[in-house]
Image (cartoon, grey):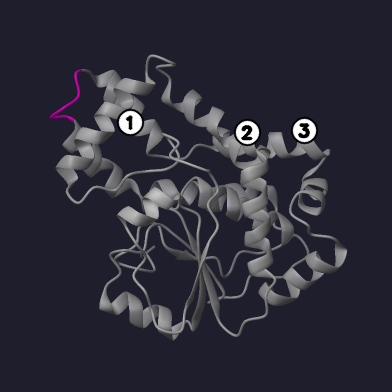
Amino acid sequence: MKNLLEGAPNARDLGGIKTLDGAMLSHGKLIRSGVLNALSADDEKTLIGLRLKTVVDFRTDDERAQKPDRSIDGVSYVHCPIVEARREGISRDKPETEDEEAMRTVKMAKRLMPRNPDGRAQMRSLYPILVGTPFAMAHYKSFFSELLSERDGALLYHCTMGKDRVGVGTALLLSALNVHRDDIFEDYLLTNERCAAGTLRLLESCRRYADSQAELDFIYELDRVDESYLAAAFETAEELYGSMAGYLENAMGLDTAAAERLRELYLV
């Protein structure tokens, strides 16, 4: 399936995902994406055609300063950082060149691997932070406030790669819209397909600087998503609040009226 935007990684419309009660997410209303600094003129036309009204940016201040969103007239830009500061494995520097990105990525792997050489285990340990810390919960709650705002057009939300912070945000949103857990995982794992070419390019560049295949394997796991990562987020939310319904109501502020309003806005 073609990426929605040629200049933004992992960009896709959530329209068409079905809910447990037979409804479907509206097309052209909710767009998940990676960084927007390199949008093309055609991308801008696509977003204007979708009547984009709001962009919610999950990145840190540093990430936003490095790669500011390309501004589109008539669009409101909302900052909802999910982590307070740079957190390796989640927040990502995006250097100007692939070579510089490779050098930085290998250096990051060398810093992280002494803690645990299993990249999958390290990523899995990060996901509870995205649902369990007060800072993250407050900003995902703000994201839901934006989702509940009346608008005649689309909302796009993004981080750098559109996989971890956006992946968890999407899982929470789809849960609130009564999407089956299996379908939530299916959407989440689609990131691996959408980002496969970029991951391959990154690994090929990193070969010039890595000292071992173990380092490359570690980088590979950090650049992908895995079912166990999102499962760790669900488990944490459910441990904290008893159930996903309890988490959405008490941590995200989605009482019965708000949950029903969300469904009115985004389901057909």
Residue 208 part of the magenta-drawn span = yes
Q: Residue 126 placed where, x, y %?
A: 54, 32
Q: Which of 19 and 203 is in front in this view?
A: 203
Task: Determine whether the residue tagged by mark 1 lies in a helix, strand or loop.
Answer: helix
User: Considering the image in quadrants, where does the C terminus appear?
Assistant: bottom right
Q: In which quarter of the image is residue 90?
A: top left
Q: Where is residue 153 in the image (x, y as percent from the top left)?
A: 56, 82
Q: Seen in the image, is 264 located left or right of residue 209?
A: right
- What residue does disc 3 label? 239
Range covered by the magenta-colored residues: 207-211
Q: Is residue 243 magenta?
A: no
Tell me whether circle 3 and circle 1 mark residues in contact (CB < 8 Å): no
Horizontal and vertical percent position of residue 132? 67, 38
Q: Which amino acid does label 1 sit on?
A: Ile
Q: Give neighbour class at mark 3: few <14, some 14-19, many 20+ (Cα, 10 Å).
A: few
Q: Is residue 21 above or below residue 136?
A: below
Mark 2–mark 3 contact, CB under 8 Å?
A: no
The residue at the point 31 percent across, 29 percent down is 108
State the residue position of label 2. 232
The rendered magenta stretch, by its main secondary structure, is classed as loop
Residue type at mark 2: give it: Ala
Q: Distance between the residues labelled 2 and 3?
A: 10 Å
Q: Residue at x 32, y 44 (%)?
A: 93
**Which numbered disc covers residue 219?**
1
- Quarter of the image that includes the N terminus: bottom left
Residue located at (29% from left, 78% from top): 42
